[in-house]
Amino acid sequence: MRFDLSDPAFDVTSDEVHAARDQDWYVETNWGWAVLRYAEVSALLRDRRFRQGNARWPAQNGIHSGLFSDWWQETLLSLEGDDHARIRRLMVPAFKKRAIEAMVPRFQALADELVDGFADRGSVEFISEFAEPYAARIICLLLGLDESHWRQVAHWADDLGASFSIDVGRQVPRIEAALSGLHGYLDEIVEDRMAHPREDLVTTLVQASVEGERLSRHELGVALVFLAFAGMETTRNQLGLALQTLLQHPDQWRLLGERPDLGGRAVEEVMRVNPTVTWVTREALEDVEFQGLRIPRGGIVQMLSHSAGTDPAAMPDPSFDITQQRPPHHGFGAGVHHCLGHFVARTDMAVALPLLARRMPDAAPDGPGRWLPVSGNTGALEFPIRFTPGR
């Protein structure tokens, strides 16, 4: 058995993948080995004989130079060792839990405002009318950007999202135009915050200092572009996937509307069974022997998030249930590359989902919608929903 991860028709949540998981903990693919079981994924994500494997993603798709290739090599996702540790250490203060929790009332007000825009109509195209403006405006709030610019920020982020698509090789002009636009816009913001500090993430990063070290102007630009696009893109996609899953379980949807305290648990459960990041990549730094598999130096392993998250060996009943406490999922990665902005994403989705469930308790899909391939980074392009108006 061999999987073709680059095939747009391949579905990482399919019965084919589950059957392979029953047979063994890994399977060969056109991009290295896919790891299918929870225990092995957990171990390999933390194994220091591997590095984050995304650094080679452009080259694997025939992109060896240019603006996109250069930027990709400098993002926190691609850096390793001392460089990664230093930049991550300098960025941590911008993501303090207390600062994010203080923004919850603004997240709630934003979610209510967006629902007010379509509540009396009884129908909504969920991605363009809620998920995208919610995710983009939260990024604007977080970075201290003018909220009225959210559509342009979302457009750039959407184009940069093609960086993770399985046809990235054909998307380079689009990606590089977005990189130039977003970098130029954020560079002006950095310039302003250096002269006029504010209570926002950009100011925190501009002023960040650990043992006398600071982020250079170039490092700030690289980091902020990645934060703006990754934070918006993943939240938008994950919200669409969350609605897809919850509406397939109407009892869970109604319960969430009645029990907003389950918002955090709902986020974890959705990311376990229907994550936007369908695999996490690692590259061997040396020849590795792991449970009978020899992985040569430079070998790639892909950790399949859904397969690991629904592994019956790790959770005897892996069915969707927002009342259950599960082992930690891998939707935000693990180890030294665990997502720096995970608490922002967890918090804004934990606010939005119960509010949506309360205001649209009988929501149901109004047609199939349009979706990205269920491989690479996935999500909805369009997801129409109908409900009883006026709540």
Image (cartoon, grey):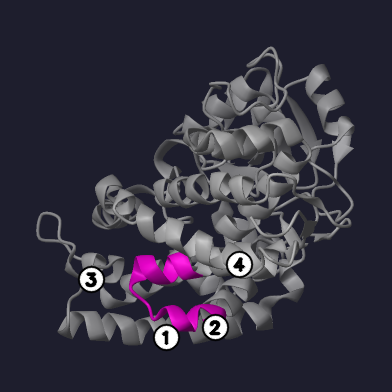
Q: Which residue is mark 2?
A: 152
Hey, what amino acid is under mark 4? Glu
**Do the residues under discs 3 and 2 have CB atoms within 8 angstroms?**
no
The magenta stretch spans which residues?
Answer: 137-152
Tell which tag, 2 or 1, sits nearer the viewer.
2
Q: Residues within 10 Å of mark 2 (few under 14, many from 20)?
A: some
Where residue 337 appears, as percent x and y from the top left, is 44, 44
What is the secondary structure assignment of the residue under circle 4? helix
Q: Is residue 367 magenta?
A: no
Residue 298 appearing in the image: no
Q: Is residue 228 visible?
A: yes
Disc 4 marks which residue? 132
| Left or right placement of residue 293 versus residue 342 in this view | right
The amino acid on which the numbered mark 3 sits, given as a three-letter code, is Thr
> As shown in the figure, which amino acid type bears the numbered disc 2?
Gln
Mark linked to residue 185: 1
Who comes first in sequence, dot 2 or dot 1? 2
Query: Which numbered marker is on residue 10?
Result: none
Sequence-wise, the earlier of marks 3 and 1 is 1
Residue under pointer 3: 203
The answer to which of 188 and 279 lies nearer the viewer is 188
Alpha carbon separation for disc pair 3 and 2: 22 Å
> Within 10 Å of the Cα at label 3, are there few (<14), some (14-19), or many (20+) other Cα atoms?
many
Say if the magenta span includes residue 145.
Answer: yes
